Structures are given as structure tokens and as C-alpha cells.
Amino acid sequence: MALNKRELFLKRRLRVRNKLRKISDGRPRLSVHRSSKNISVQLIDDAKGVTLAAASSLEKDLGVVGKNNVEAAAKIGAAIAERAKKAGVEEVIFDRGGFLFHGKIKALADAAREGGLKF
């Protein structure tokens, strides 16, 4: 029963989301998406179905346009923490999707924690 990378990714994503749904307690979800060229993060209120804040490496004012490395991920994490504070959010649930908590995803999470988000 050999699964390809995409199927393993989708299984991991569903497993993570189902666990988060059980422990969320109404907290917003910090959802991360990583592509081969960019990284983006959204702060989502699942109860209302709205995005409270977002940050991406496509934004020119962050100075990491088109970069997808650990330094860019750290800047994105700091930016989302600042924007979450402006939106009045301090506690979130970290949704890594199907991505492993390593490298860029870990750098983003650590920078968001240093910026004041609790998860």
C-alpha cells in the first residue's frame, strides 16, 4: 500500500485539521501554506468563516517577494503576529496543514510566538 507524496500530504492535513477542530475552543486558526516559491499565512475565524489577518511573501512591503526560505518565513511570522495584535487576537491554534513542523514552518511559528501570539 505505497502512497505517493500527495496522498500522504492530504492524509496528514486531514489528521491535523480534525485534531485542531477538537481542541480549538473558539480560538482563531493560524493556517500556513507553503509553495515552492512563496509562503503565506492566514488568521481564520472558523465560527464566522472570515479571515482576520493575512501575510504573504508576495507582499512588497515585507521585502521578501518571491523568496521561500527560513528568513522569509520568520519575517512572515513576525508580520502576522503584529497584524493579529491589531485585530485583537492573542491566542490561536497553529494549523500547519500537511506540512511537517520543520524548517520554514518552524521558523514561522517561532517568529509568531516571539511576536506575542500564544499557541
Image: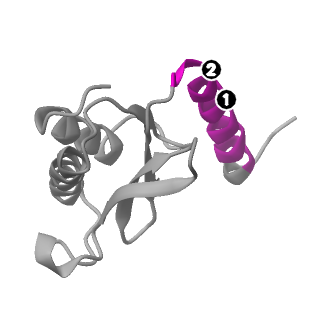
The magenta-colored residue range is 7-25
Residue 22, magenta (yes or no): yes
Residue type, mark 1 in image = Asn
Tell me if residue 60 comes above or below residue 69 in the rendering.
below
Q: Tell me, yes or no, whether the two marked residues, 1 and 2, touch with CB atoms within 8 Å.
A: yes
Farthest residue, direction right: 1
Residue indicated by mark 1: 18
- Residue 51: image location, x then y, percent: 45, 57
| Residue toward you, 42 or 5 | 42
| SS class, disc 1 | helix
Q: Magenta stretch mostly in which secondary structure?
A: helix
Would residue 14 be found to the left or right of residue 56 on screen? Answer: right
Quadrant (top left/top right/bottom left/bottom right) for the C terminus: top left
Tell me if residue 63 comes above or below residue 14 in the rendering.
below
Residue type, mark 2 in image = Lys
Residue indicated by mark 2: 22
Task: Look at 69% across and 53% down and name the residue there.
Answer: 6
Residue 23 picture quarter: top right
Q: Is residue 51 visible?
A: yes
Task: Look at 34% across and 60% down and name the residue there.
Answer: 54
Residue 71 picture quarter: bottom left
| Residue toward you, 18 or 82 | 82
Mark 2 neighbour density, 10 Å: few (under 14) some (14–19) many (20 or more): few
Tell me if residue 113 comes above or below residue 8 in the rendering.
above
Quadrant (top left/top right/bottom left/bottom right) for the N terminus: top right
Tell me if residue 62 comes above or below residue 21 in the rendering.
below
| Residue toward you, 45 or 59 | 45
| SS class, disc 2 | helix
Would residue 13 be found to the left or right of residue 2 on screen? Answer: left
